[in-house]
Amino acid sequence: MSSIFSQIVAGDIPARVVYEDETTLAFLDANPLAPGHTLVIPKTEYERLNDVPDDVAGDLYATLHALVPAIEVAVDADASTVAFNNGEAAGQEVPHVHGHIIPRFSDDGGAPIHGIAGDPPGLEDDELDEIAAEIEAHV
Ligand code: AMP
């Protein structure tokens, strides 16, 4: 069974498509958190960002990059929050990579991205050094 977003790519279910190229598709979120809330997906179904090949990752970013200013102008937004729920534990519900572009307005009552995680872990300098080294070693 293909994801609901693959069904949109195939044209089997409708969507308000705002941009399409060979490898990516963008359409309005069906339950918008703001006017212009848009999802950007790779046409090929990958569950997480971790699964996306480098060339498609570049295409995905290029589409986000083109759409952010277009959406802000279209809905007269002051800013935007751009984010991926990458994996179930992060709140991902549709197992097909999608970037959210959520237009933001100075009076929208929303929060910055800093508000989405749990309690801050309060890490010491040596722990931060160790984590940075671990990440660097795995890139
Ligand atoms: P996430 O929690 O990051 O997986 O977000 C999934 C998003 O997909 C939600 O914001 C839904 O409103 C949106 N969504 C689910 N089904 C559709 C659909 N058929 N067309 C457009 N957006 C959808």
Image (tube, grey):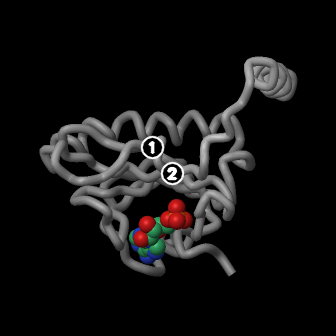
Cα–Cα span, label 1 and label 2:
6 Å
Q: Can the viewer see residue 46 in this picture?
A: no
Nearer to us in this view, 24 or 129: 129
- Please determine whether, in this image, residue 129 is positioned above or below residue 57: above
In-image side of 39 versus 23 (left or right): left
Give the residue displayed 61% in from the left and 73% down from the top: 3
Q: Secondary structure at mark 2?
A: loop
Residue 17 falls in image quadrant: bottom left
Question: Mark 1 touching mark 2, by CB under 8 A?
Answer: yes
Tag 2 residue: 116
In-image side of 22 versus 2 (left or right): left
Q: Quadrant of the C terminus?
A: top right
Q: Can the viewer see residue 103 in this picture?
A: yes
In-image side of 90 versus 7 (left or right): right
Q: Answer yes or no: disc 1 within 8 Å of ligand 1.
A: no
Residue 13 falls in image quadrant: bottom left
The percent coordinates of residue 42 (x first, y second) are: 56, 52
Quick one: which residue is furthest to the left in this view? 76
The percent coordinates of residue 48 (x first, y second) are: 68, 54
Q: Residues within 10 Å of mark 1 (few under 14, many from 20)?
A: few
Tag 1 residue: 113
The percent coordinates of residue 105 (x first, y second) are: 19, 46
Nearer to us in this view, 101 or 128: 128
Give the residue displayed 21% in from the left and 53% down from the top: 108
Q: Secondary structure at mark 1?
A: helix
Q: Answer yes or no: disc 2 within 8 Å of ligand 1.
A: no
Q: Quadrant of the N terminus?
A: bottom right
- Please determine whether, in this image, residue 122 is positioned above or below residue 39: above
- Please determine whether, in this image, residue 135 is positioned above or below residue 5: above
The percent coordinates of residue 82 (x first, y second) are: 42, 43
Amino acid at the residue labelled 1: Ile
